[in-house]
């Protein structure tokens, strides 16, 4: 779905992503791994339009998306989560969910006065869907709670549910299991698997190898901004270049 | 009795003014330090037009349009800035507009000001006496309150809040935060223009000196004191502060004391702001979910 050609980005003297060419095949879950500072998050930022590339091209479903603004990429169907969760702290769990649907009629000033019926109908539908998703991630008892009062793990769940609420064609997850306890990691993995069964497509940055090996159908490995390997989890595990990059031997 | 009615007229005018800033600052997180400019534009446009025999209804609409248009024009370059830099830009804008009032003598009569602004006539009803004017300002306050309430409780208001809470998260969900900021800013500007219009026709005399940074600070203080991001905060803040400000003005003090009044008032406002920031940053009314 996503394809990059010769993608490069440097910050000052640091080459964060260097001449990256890869194509995500039809795997439901693709992994992106690499040591710290290898350019994984930068690659996500490039794909989602948060930072412009120095060189190279990015395609999504055959359409070129580099140069689009980040909200345009999101509306185009790529929604992302963040390494450090970004919930809307002083809004309730429900409000966090209701923000997500794209192109809401009620977000237009004119519709507020001339189209209140459509808005009410949309809100009803969105609310219903939001409730289902909140229930799915197990936060229904917290739906009217402010997001800032949630635990970090719960915020991760909320971010995941909110991503789904945006109805994307693909979700990019930046370290979905970082900083949370093993039980919560299990919960999140099960959720991702469940969403995969419903046809959602994921691209995941993850440090936890167990998670990556279990979930992903295909893995890319970055080191120093370059793609050093790609393949099935088994192949990656035994790839000498990958072992070298990770262990520094 | 007249003093009491006068107080409430001022309270309602400043409630509208504060509600308009509350939409920008409280709900959208736009720290606008030049808000008085739109108040001034409203006052000047409507005053100039009515002084040239244009009916009040048209003058009012023109004043609101002018304030909104100016807000739109300003928002395009400045809303690309973030947080503090945006604040500085608005601060500069407020001063520029005041300079225009002051220096475009052919139009505004400069520092001489515009005297004799007629009382408003709406649909051939003249709001001349104090009770009548109170009714007018009350009516517009309620109208503004209801309009803002519809906006704030709608998906649009929700998007404003999302922009305030976390721009990056909002963008990642496909929200064009630039558009939402512009919308909030323009709506805020129009309503500030309304407050300015009502004020100009009430005092019947306006001059550039009425639209200084001090006015912005006062309205900021009202919003912060009342509780930013709350529906009733601006009213509460306006009641407390306007009551305080206007009652100082009517204190019967010996003549030699009165020259200390204005600086004293500013000192009290300043200390109040510091006190609030330390002990109750969320204001008298607290937005749900706010607080530490």
Image: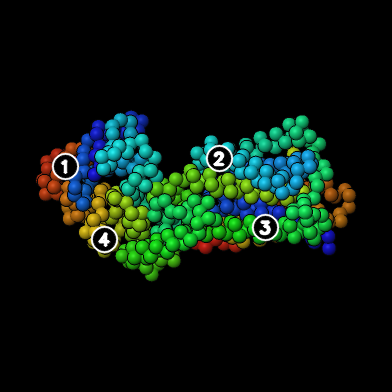
Q: CA distance from mark 1 to mark 3?
A: 64 Å
Dot 4 and dot 1 residues touching (CB under 8 Å): no
Q: Residues within 10 Å of mark 4 (few under 14, many from 20)?
A: some
Q: CA distance from mark 2 to mark 1?
A: 47 Å
- SS at mark 2? helix
- Does residue B119 appear left or right of residue A221 in this picture? right
- SS at mark 3? helix
Q: Specify the subunit that label 4 lies on.
A: A
Read off the residue under disc 4: A191
Dot 2 and dot 1 residues touching (CB under 8 Å): no
Read off the residue under disc 3: B141
Dot 3 and dot 2 residues touching (CB under 8 Å): no
For residue B145, the mark is: none
Q: Is A205 in front, or is B208?
A: B208
Dot 4 and dot 2 residues touching (CB under 8 Å): no
- SS at mark 4? helix
Dot 3 and dot 4 residues touching (CB under 8 Å): no
Q: Position of residue A213 (x, y in %)?
A: 17, 52
Q: CA distance from mark 3 to mark 2?
A: 25 Å
Discs 1 and 3 share one subunit = no
- Does residue B193 appear left or right of residue A240 in this picture? right
Read off the residue under disc 2: B75
Read off the residue under disc 1: A230
Q: Nearer the viewer, mark 3 or mark 4?
A: 3
Q: Specify the subunit that label 3 lies on.
A: B
Discs 2 and 1 share one subunit = no
């Amino acid at each position: 779905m996503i394809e990059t050609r010769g993608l490069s980005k440097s910050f000052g003297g640091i080459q964060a992503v260097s001449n990256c060419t890869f194509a995500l095949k039809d795997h439901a879950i693709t992994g992106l791994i690499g040591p710290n500072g290898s350019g994984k998050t930068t690659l996500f930022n490039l794909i989602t339009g948060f930072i412009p590339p120095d060189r190279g091209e990015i395609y999504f479903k055959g359409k070129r998306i580099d140069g689009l603004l980040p909200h345009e990429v999101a509306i185009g169907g790529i929604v992302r989560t963040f390494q450090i969760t970004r919930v809307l702290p002083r809004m309730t769990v429900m409000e966090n969910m209701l923000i997500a649907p794209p192109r809401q009629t009620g977000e237009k000033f004119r519709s507020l006065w001339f189209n209140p019926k459509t808005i009410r109908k949309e809100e009803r539908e969105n609310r219903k869907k939001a409730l289902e998703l909140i229930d799915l991630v197990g936060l229904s008892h917290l739906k009217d709670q402010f997001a800032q009062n949630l635990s970090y793990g719960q915020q991760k769940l909320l971010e995941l549910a909110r991503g789904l609420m945006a109805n994307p064609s693909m979700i990019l997850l930046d370290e979905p299991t970082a900083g949370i306890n093993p039980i919560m990691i299990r919960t999140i993995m099960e959720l991702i698997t469940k969403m995969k069964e419903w046809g959602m497509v994921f691209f995941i940055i993850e440090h936890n190898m167990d998670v990556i090996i279990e979930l992903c159908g295909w893995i890319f490995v970055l080191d120093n901004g370059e793609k050093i390997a790609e393949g099935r989890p088994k192949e990656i595990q035994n790839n000498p270049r990958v072992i070298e990059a990770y262990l520094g031997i | 009795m007249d003093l009491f009615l006068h107080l409430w007229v001022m309270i309602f005018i400043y409630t509208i003014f504060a509600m308009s800033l509350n939409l920008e600052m409280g709900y959208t997180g736009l720290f606008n330090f030049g808000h008085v400019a739109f108040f001034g534009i409203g006052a000047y446009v409507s005053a100039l037009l009515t002084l040239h025999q244009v009916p009040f209804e048209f003058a009012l609409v023109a004043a609101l349009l002018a304030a909104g248009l100016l807000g739109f024009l300003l928002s395009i370059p400045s809303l690309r800035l973030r947080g503090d830099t945006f604040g500085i830009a608005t601060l500069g804008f407020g001063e520029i507009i005041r300079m225009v009032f002051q220096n475009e003598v052919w139009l505004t009569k400069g520092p001489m000001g515009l005297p004799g602004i007629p009382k408003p006539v709406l649909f051939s009803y003249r709001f001349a006496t104090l009770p009548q004017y109170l009714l007018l300002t009350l009516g517009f306050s309620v109208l503004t309150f209801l309009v803002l309430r519809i906006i704030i409780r709608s998906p649009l208001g929700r998007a404003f809040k999302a922009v305030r809470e976390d721009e990056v998260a909002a963008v990642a969900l496909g929200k064009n935060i630039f558009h939402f900021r512009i919308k909030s800013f323009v709506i805020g500007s129009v309503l500030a223009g309304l407050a300015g219009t009502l004020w100009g026709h009430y005092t019947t005399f306006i001059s550039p000196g009425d639209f200084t940074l001090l006015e912005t600070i006062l309205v900021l203080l009202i919003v912060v004191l009342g509780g930013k991001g709350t529906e009733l905060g601006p009213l509460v803040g306006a009641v407390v502060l306007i009551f305080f400000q206007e009652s100082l003005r009517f204190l019967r003090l010996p003549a030699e004391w009165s020259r200390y009044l204005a600086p004293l008032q500013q000192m009290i406002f300043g200390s109040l702001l510091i006190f609030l920031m330390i002990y109750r940053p969320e204001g008298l009314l607290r937005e749900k979910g706010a607080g530490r």
